[in-house]
Structures are given as structure tokens and as C-alpha cells.
Amino acid sequence: MKTSQTSRAHALHLTHAHGSFSALQKLLHWSMAVLILAMLFVGVGMVTTVSRAHDVLIDLHRPLGAALLLLVIVRLVVRLRRGAPALPASMPPPQRAIAALSHWVLYALMLAMPLIGWGMLSAGGYPVTMIGAFHLPPILPVDVRLFALLRALHTWLAFALFALVLMHLAAALLHALILRDGVFAAMAPRVRHRN
């Protein structure tokens, strides 16, 4: 009995590996895409304004960062358990290597950015306010030099994330509009047609 269940699970995994991402993976991907773009624009707004909007943007930035941290952990677990569809056989090996590397760098940045932001606020002695009186606990001791270092790192990694997101978007458009090789379709939301 267990052997047949294992065989079926293995067959489903193989089918998934050559088809498309699961509905959960698609939901996580597109939800995070919206949140990451929102975070990048909120971050730009935070550093370019000294108006009262600055405080509003900070109050928005922190819970969004915490939500992204939670989502990226869930997404990594799902990705490691379910895998990903195989890339087209027509894709040259160097492009396959670049695609794999860029995805794992993207995951690393999505994980690092909220953790560094959390650590930065902790080192600066700032409360990591979520909603109302709910605060996240500090993860680092108060240290002015560490705060400055993490703030600079958070800024530079935000630029790197923005550049990688643009490259990811460009690659998605290339696969969707020019190559039409199924790479974009594997992550595209399924549209149901009514008869």
C-alpha cells in the first residue's frame, strides 16, 4: 500500500516537474511580486520625502516586510518540496545556469532584505511595530555602528533586488512574447474560459 502511494506521489512530482507550477506556487509568486514592487516604491518614497507621508510609509514598510519574510519562508519550503517545471530542452546550458542562479539569488535577497531591516531597526533601538501595539522582538543588541552598517547594506541590497526584479521581468517578457517556449506559461495564472 505504502509503495503504491509512494509511486503515485513520485509520478505526480515527475508530471509537475515537466508541466507547470502548482496553484499554491503561482499564488505565492504573484502575491509576492505585488508586495515586492510595493515595498520597493514605498522604500523609494521613504528616502525621498521629509513630509508627513514619511511616517505613513514607514508604518506601511515594516508590516509589509514582515509579511514578505513569512511568505518567502513558505515559498522556499513549497519550492523545495514540490520542485519546479523543467526548462525547455532548447535552452542552452549557460542560460539554464544563469536562470537557476538568478532564481536562488532572488530567493536569498527576498529572505535577506526583511531580516536585515529587522536587524537594522533592532540595532538602532527602534521598535518593529506591526499593527497597533504589536511589536516584533529585537533580534540584535542596540549598536549604533551596526545600525549604520545594516542600513547601508539594506539600501544596497534594495538596489540589487530592484535590478534583479527588472531582469526577471525582462526574461519573463522574452519567454512570453518572443520565445513562447512555455517558461512563462508555467507560472502564468490559469484563465478559465466560459463556454
Image (spheres, grey):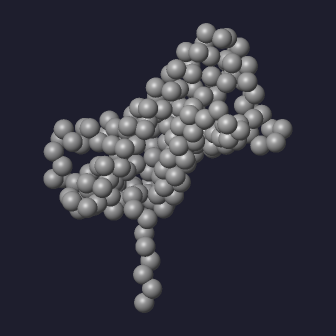
Residue 16 percent across, percent down from the top left: 37, 58
Residue 15 percent across, percent down from the top left: 34, 60
Residue 82 percent across, percent down from the top left: 44, 51
What number of labels is visible?
Answer: 0
Residue 146 percent across, percent down from the top left: 60, 13
Asked whether residue 77 appears in the rendered view, the answer is no
Apparent side of residue 7 relative to residue 152 in the rendered image (left or right): left
Apparent side of residue 47 relative to residue 51 in the rendered image (left or right): left
Q: Is residue 70 above or below residue 186?
A: above
Apparent side of residue 56 relative to residue 30 in the rendered image (left or right): right
Asked whether residue 33 appears in the rendered view, the answer is yes
Most extreme residue toward the right, as rendered? 133
Write the residue at 62% across / 22% down: 120
Write the residue at 42% across / 69% down: 190
Write the residue at 42% across / 81% down: 193
Q: Is residue 74 above or below residue 160?
A: below
Quarter holding residue 103? top left
| Residue toward you, 175 or 159 | 159
Screen quadrant of the C terminus: bottom left
| Residue toward you, 181 or 58 | 58
